[in-house]
Amino acid sequence: MAFVPGQPLTAVVQRIEIQKLQERNNLILGFSIGGGIDQDPGQNPFSESKSDKGIYVTRITPGGPADVSGLMMGDKIMQVNGYDMTMVTHDYARKKLTKKSEVVVRLLVTRKSLEQAVKQSMGPKLTPQFDNTAWWRGRHPHDGVRSTGRASKERRGEERICFFMTA
Amino acid sequence: MTAVLPKLPRVRFALCARTLDNFRGSSLQQQQCRGFHWIFPHVLLINGGASHGNSELRCSHYARCAGRWTDPGCCCVKAPVLPVLESCDARCCSRMNSSNQRDSDIQKKIDHEIRMRDGACKLLAACSQRDQALEAAKSLQTCSTRIMAYMSELQRMKEAQVMQKVTRRSSDAGPMDDRLPCKGKVAISDLRIPLMWKDTEYFKNKGELHRCAVFCLLQLGGEIFDTDMVIVDRTLTDICFDNTIVFSEASPGFELRLELYSCCSEDDYSAGSTPRKLASKLSSSLGRSAGKKLRAAMEPGPCSPVSNGGASPLLLPVPSVPGPKYHLLAHTTLSLSHVQDSFRTQDLTISGNEESSYWVPLYGSMCCRLAAQPRCMTQQVMSGCLKVKQCGGDPQSWRKVYAVLKGTSLFCYHRQEDVEANVEPAFTIAVNKETRIRASEKDPHSKVQNICISNQYGGEEVTHTLTTDSREDTHRWMEAFWQHFYDMSQWKQCCDDLMKIEQPSPRKPAPVTPKQGSLYHEMVIESSDDPSSTVSDILARRLQELELRSQLGTSNPWMSLFEENNPKSAGRPRPCTSRLSGHSPCSPRRLPRSPMSPHRCPQLGLLSSDVSLTSDSDSHCSTSPCSQHHGWPEPSSNFSLMSSSPSRLRPRTLSLDAKLSTLRGRGFGGGGGTFHCPCQPAPSSLLAAIPISARSPLSQRSTQTTLSCSSSTSSNSSTNSESSHSPESSEGVPFSRPSPARRSLRNLRARLDPRNWLQSQV
């Protein structure tokens, strides 16, 4: 999605909670990611803007944990267990998703249809389509400084989530 | 109808003139003043596209019948003719009665080009990648130009026909003494256009590389060819086109028109979706030159030069298809005087200025090698039996020879068979510009005239005398000599020596660029798609795209593809639960049954391997839920089954794979086996066939071995220990069947290569 560097980014996100699946000595989630600040954004088939270096879901194993939880192909992952994913390298994102110590992964993902759905529901009806749709406000960390410390700060403080409306 | 006619003819007349004017510039001027007795038996009015505003023409076929115009299909003309050919209805062309064979040939060509053009339009609309779009736009331009050229040739032929009729009526055919010189082959190769970048481009411009796509269009007579497309940026000092283009029907007075087209090839600028505010902010915050270009690109760009009679560029405004548009950057015309056996520099006339988005700083000249091979040099002009006598020799020493006139010599062989056997001729008589040939007085001994050929060898004049068996033979030989001399005088320097022309080898299709090896790179997912059928849909579209792309490079008939245009089976979502029992019945595939030309196989194979690649990786994390619900058969037994069957006939459980593998097997026969998924080593591809066997012990181990293979060389996968690391499918690697060592090296390279777009499984 188009963003202006330095300005807060607003996005409609969906919370997705995925239970990792134990497979022998592996914990798997059942999807693939692509993207990252060290990757070529022009080759991302899912992004709206070809300069978007975010982490995108490129494939979902049908029937896998991610599929069951409602993750969809083409989703952009904004947060993983509180860790920001909008300005990270590919490997960092993968690591945060595949921590062996965590069995549950809570993602905030966004996709185009969410925003549209919310807009629709703002019209005639007042009940939203999604229960756990939330407005996600956070500073788009385009100022270049990346470190775990910052991420945790975001996790704690800056995540102002207001539930939009509940049925 | 007849009542209408008296009013209209004048309009029609003016119309025709102007239409044809657009075709061919001012050559019609003298025809116009002839008044109403228009000589055209057929006038073709082209269907004007809707985008041309208020002019409305419909195709009509006017036939001249008994001196009056009759109009089977009425036409209604509202406004003066504008440059046309937005959408030319070739069917109308075919309605013209052309008893002439050449007419129908040209019309076939026009039809063919129109189909190609339609295909290119469709591909352009379907393209998602910039490179493909550029290629498609280039084909579109070429097709449009060719259509134009064929149309004008058609008109010219009609003109000529009628002219002939007219002259025949007026005067009897006098002694037709005008010889026509022989035709020849003209080849242009090694085109090189030097560039002249400003220093500011290098030093001050820190922004992104400004790239342009350029290609050349070459036209000689009725033949139009285009070169490959080259991407130009400031790291290039010359634009080099490696193609050799050979025109086979050139007369000595040929005019080879070369045009250089360019198109800005920036991804960021092409998206019209960038909001205006952002765009203006960007353009003001970028460097001056880059911003200007951006602004130029953002505006509805200026039309390519509109042809309005006179010397117009070859291209007309192309149909309004979204996508990159090429603009004329420079042009030049070459003729016989430029022909030489070595490289020469020619001047280019540059159009366009620095402000245009498609500007490339040309130095102003161009280097190329233009060679010509007239037929008289390469083919036998005349051959037959003769008797030769050297002058000054024994009057009785006539030698019987079989003589062949070719190039600059008359080869005399002992026997006719020697010619085919490539035996050296008995002797050779030079026939070149210094040779004098004359018919001598009647020999008292024989009834026919002799032919004397005299050459200057050194300071000496040597004369050979030829005689034939009959007067007709002598005539024919003299005629042949005259024609030969005439040809040599016309072709001038080309007849001194035979110039070498390399026959361009049949072009292999441009391989899919390494970056775009993966299916998922080129898929664009619409959010509204029904997920269960998404992948099949996309694959169907991809296959079609690939087919279109491959067919663009050949002259394969498009019709078969477009007749089955909407893939019938694409929409049908396939249930995922097909069994492990050999080939699942594959759908009557949407791909046309038309024989796939061999060079298409690699690309389709590539696609299949892509899909199998993804399904392979898929299988890795295909998990217990699957197995529990569907109760798959025992992994281990199946695994052994798998290992026994050759990869080509891998039964697939995922429906997608089944379809594609049968496709592979059917379509390509032996070729199917070669297209493995290269990025993962064989063992894992075997077990891919069994989705649930991802959990079998064997598979895991082989997975691990894969990992260790790649991790040994990669720096990143030290993370193996902490994560459930499954093999990364690094898609940036060109597909082939590499050895394990090379594969891991490639993985490493792929991972470190910033131009890739890695995907990881989690």
Image: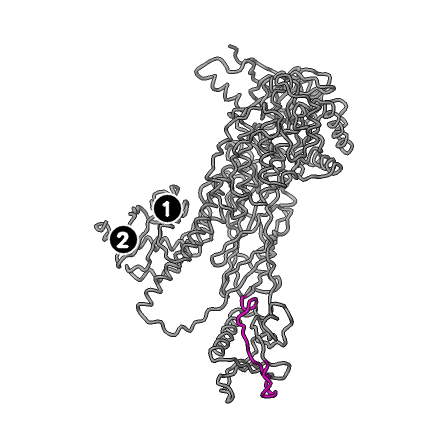
Relative to the observer, which residue lies in front, B67 or B205?
Answer: B67
Q: Secondary structure at mark 1?
A: loop
Per the rendered image, the range of residues in magenta is B374-399
| Position of A79 relative to B217 (above/below) | above
Q: Which residue is mark 1?
A: B47
Rendering quarter of residue B672: top right
Relative to the observer, which residue lies in front, B359 or B240?
Answer: B240
Contact check, label 1 and label 2, Cβ < 8 Å: no
Q: Secondary structure at mark 2?
A: strand
Residue B220: horizontal and vertical position, in percent? 50, 58
Rendering quarter of residue A151: top right
Q: Chain of mark 2?
A: B
Q: Compare marks 1 and 2 and give the one earlier in the sequence.
A: 1
Residue B543: horizontal and vertical position, in percent? 55, 36
Q: Which residue is mark 2?
A: B70
Q: Chain of mark 1?
A: B
Q: Label 1 amino acid?
A: Asn
Residue B417: horizontal and vertical position, in percent? 60, 70
Q: Is residue B21 left or right of residue B662?
A: left
Relative to the observer, which residue lies in front, B232 or B185?
Answer: B185
Disc 1 from disc 2: Cα separation: 19 Å
Q: Label 2 amino acid?
A: Thr
